[in-house]
Amino acid sequence: MTDFILDVQGLETTFKTPEGVIHAVNGVSFGLSESETLGVVGESGCGKSVTMLSVLGLIASPPGKVTDGKALFSGQDLIKMKKEEIRRVRGAQIGMIFQDPMTSLNPVLTIGRQLEEPLMLHIGMTKQQARDRAAELLTMVGIPNAKDRLKDYPHQYSGGMRQRVMIAMALACTPQILIADEPTTALDVTIQAQIMDLVKRLRDELGMAIIWITHDLGVVAGLAQRVLVMYGGFIIEEAPVKELFTNPSHPYTIGLLGSLPRVDEKERGKLYSIEGSPPVLYQKPNSCPFAPRCRWAMERCWKENPVLEPVAPEHRIACWVDTKTGRPR
Amino acid sequence: MSSNNDVLLRVEDLVMHFPIYRGVIQRRVGAVRAVDGISFDVKRGETLGLVGESGCGKSTTGRTILQLYKPTAGQVHFEGVDLVHLKGENMRQMRRKMQMIFQDPYASLNPRMTVEQIVGEPLMVHSAATGKEIQERVAHLLEVVNLNPAFASRYPHEFSGGQRQRIGVARALALQPSFIICDEPISALDVSIQAQVVNLLEELQSQFNLTYLFIAHDLSMVRHISTRVAVMYLGVIMELANRDELYTHPLHPYTQALLSAVPIPDPVADAMRKRTILEGDVPSPANPPSGCRFRTRCPIAEAICAESRPEFREVKPGHFVACFFAERFL
């Protein structure tokens, strides 16, 4: 287990709301190897973003609280770190990009200023060094006339360009890990293709590990080496990317893949649909969180929450049912 | 385009420009050319998919067809009647036959109205039913969209996104229209809910013999639901063809690039695809390129593309393309 550069164990996060305490992340454990690309998929509210924000110490408290678990990064537990300490890790050793590049950039500062800041802060570059490096970074993410464009403000960039700037910023201090939270969701598909192309190129050049959070199984198929599928604050399936798409084994994953029409596929007839909607957990469940929507649900599913268990090499699912036979596994 | 009885809606050279005003006296300094001369038919009983990226004018097209915007130029014929010059009561009567389902089920339902009021409102406005009858009709409509009629007295916030979209569908069905414009009806919904709503739309179509204009940016879903598909770019239709023809033999370089950019949920098939990655961004519709709108990003553009606008022509039976070089890909 020591070869993981990030090792998350038993993470639990809750949010206090007027309606009660929401259990957003319920004991999530996973490891990230060096230069690995890990895809995390799930629908809104499944806990995929909250998991990563918890690891990065970015959960607003109150109302949020990481109630349990560890996140070991180079031998240190990120969860236990003080604000000052984790700030030094974020942006330096772990870079982040978020969904909406407009709200993540400060509208009243030039792009150059925002790119130079982490370089001076984290690596102690001088103003001039930082300026040169900033231009280099913009060129690296494919923005032409980088030197001049450093003087521009975020609104002078298009959506795709802003996301390129975010990537440049996240990679400014050559982090070991890049955490990307739905970075292409707000973009058009031709721009999404540009950004994914860029990320793949940079990954090969710089060799960083990536955690890519998305609801889009297509994006994960093209980018990730290993995938975690989340539902109701739990990891319910974990597999290498090819294995997941050729042999999806959790009823939720099977349902999701069945409900997606494909651009390269002729008539399929009716789409498979998962009835009902995702849960909001006011209590830590003691049954399978997917049971109310599962067509294979058995008695045991209502009494005991399944844990992740292997079904094939490197392939684990949290389910009591063998979906191939419909019997208990 | 041939004329026959099957055509429910005919759009001819439709133009919708939004003026830009500047300065203290609000002088007109230009226009956003949201829709810039498009023509197409929608046949009775079919689903015409209208796809394109943000800002291409696909939603404006839908709204202009319904005369929610007064078109700058062009004609819209619905069941042979010219909507552009229709006024007052005649227009109001026409509106019963054409309804719309909106993108955002959170914004398109009034939070202070109950489901019964929301779904019953079109019936009241058009005096199609009264009192007790409205209640019965609403209950029936809710059943049709697979919602429990007992929920009629609840408010929108008590429903999930998918259920709200069903309420929007029930409202659109209230006046028994023959034509529904679905403006990105599923893009605000979670993946597992999208299939529910799409299946419902398909069921309703065969049950009530509906015709859809399905506006979306999700090319995979459009392939699934459409009979024919039109691709828009910067206010212009670039290509229109039968669904499978368009997806397997795209003739316009933009359609080709667009299709190759869609991620496929299958790592093996995805790795084997040939990708065309377009350079740069979509130009502003306030100042579109001369000639062909796509030429600034087109991998095969030549001098002629800047000089004149390529005609939207039928290259194969039923397959229309606006490109000088479409024959290269035949």
Image (spheres, coloured by chain):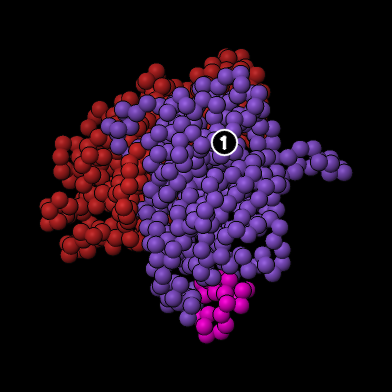
- Residue B38 image-quadrant placement: top right
Q: Could you say which is closer to the camera, residue B26 or residue B315? A: B315
Residue B12 pos. (x, y %): 62, 47
Classify residue A220 as left or right of residue B25.
left
Chain in purple colour:
B
Q: Quadrant of the N terminus of chain A?
A: top left
x and y, in percent, of residue B144 in the image = 41, 70
Image coords of residue B78 (percent x, y) = 59, 58
- The answer to whether any part of residue B35 appears in the image is no
Q: In which quarter of the image is residue A165?
A: top right
Up the image or down, A106 lies above or below A59; here it is above
**Pointer 1 local density, CA inside 10 Å: few below 14, some 14–19, many at least 20:** some
Report the predominant secondary structure element of the magenta stretch.
helix
Residue A258 visible at all: yes
What residue is rendered at 67% in x and 44% in y? B15
Chain letter for mark 1? B
- Tell me which segment is drawn in magenta: B115-135
Closest to the observer: B266 or A281? B266
Residue holding disc 1: B312
Figure chain in red: A
Q: Which of A259 and B67 is in front in this view?
A: B67
